[in-house]
Every structure is written in C-alpha cells, then in structure tokens.
Image (cartoon, rainbow, N blue to C red):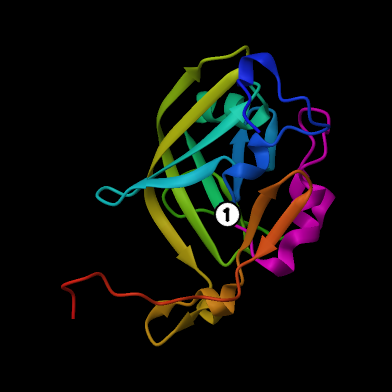
Amino acid sequence: MFYRPAEGHGLPHNPFNAIVAPRPIGWISTRSSAGDNLAPYSFFNAVAYVPPQVMFASTGRKDSVQAIEESGVFAVNLVSADLIGPMNATSAMLPRGTDEFTVAGLTKADCETIPCPRVAESPATLECRMTQVLQLAGKDNFLVLGEVTGVHLRDDCLRDGRYDLRLVRPLARCGYRDYAVVEDLVTLTRPGED
C-alpha cells in the first residue's frame, strides 16, 4: 500500500499514529491563572543532552500550551505501567480550570526550580523552562521546546547508580488505542567501545 497523506489513506483509522511507535508519553503539568493542569502527550521526546532539552507537540492550543505561554514553565512527568489508569483519566476533555491531579487521584508535589506542580508518583520528572513555542504546518499544531532545569528521580527506580527501566516499566504509546510496557531490554555496545 502507498498513500499520499494529503489525499487520504482509505483505511478506517489513520495509520500514521501507529507507524512511529512506541513513543514515550510526556505527562505535562502546568500552573497558570486558570489553575493547575495535567495532560498526557505522546508526541514527546528528548532532543538534546547539553543543556538537556525536551519537546512535545500539541494539536490545538490546549490548556497546557496556554499555561506554558503564560508562565514560561512546565514539568514533564514520565509514566510507568502502574500509572496507566491515572494517565488515561487526565486525557479526558475537561473544562478549563479543572484540576486533573484531583480528577485522577494523584499526589501533587512542588517543583524545585520552577513554580509548577509535578506528579509525586511519577518515576521521573523533568522541570523545564520553555525556550520556544512554534506553530507548525497545519490548522492548529504547536511544538513546545524546553530546557530541563531540574530532575526528580524516585529512589526506588534507581539500582546500582542507574535509572533502571526494568524497575520503572515505562508506558509507551503505540497508536490507535494501543500502549506498550517496556519490560524487555537489549544491551548493546557500539563498535569500538569497550
């Protein structure tokens, strides 16, 4: 099969959502004059090491994007398999000003370097200062970039000095309504490395 996105695919569901998979989930928490907000984004990733930087994309100028434009900060809470229920609860389309932490029964904690809440249950949280919000091609697509200014790691997710993904069991988005739990890891060394 071949199709041009501009002409449609003829399938019952858009395959693009499942092609680039699995994708990490950025559970974005913000604080604005409307209150605290928490929403999952599967178009999320790390984009640079030094300084550490992340990005997420939003279809629509949703509450998260508006809050980041107002405050200039956001936190990325990583999602582990045990948080699938609360993460899904925060994906609901709720009225602006609704506190998704309360809706999902999550514990809110303060960030250290930015005035923003974070998910205390998350295995890792990245505190970020927004560097850019870019409007992308299309009707209502936005890319948010941020520099990481603080990192929280749950102590029980560390083993032998490493953030251990076997302990974390990260949740990933696979497209459609499908998710995956990262449990099987393969360790490789690059050619020429000891």
Q: Residue 50: in sight, yes or no?
A: yes
**Identity of the amino acid at label 1?**
Asn
Q: What is the x, y in percent for residue 97?
A: 76, 31
Q: Is residue 102 something that shows in the picture? A: no
Q: Is residue 55 above or below residue 171?
A: above
Q: Is residue 169 above or below residue 90?
A: below
Q: Is residue 123 left or right of residue 188?
A: right
Q: Residue furthest left?
A: 192
Image check: 114 left or right of 34? left
Q: Nearer the viewer, residue 179 or 148?
A: 179
What residue sits 60% from the left and 68% below the top?
182
Q: Residue at x 40, y 55 (%)?
A: 150
- Residue 20 covered by magenta stretch: no
10 Å crowding of disc 1: few (<14), some (14-19), many (20+): many
Secondary structure, mark 1, is: strand
Q: Which residue is mark 1?
A: 77
Image location (x, y in percent) of residue 54:
42, 44
Q: Is residue 103 left or right of residue 69?
A: right
Above or below: residue 114 compared with residue 105: above
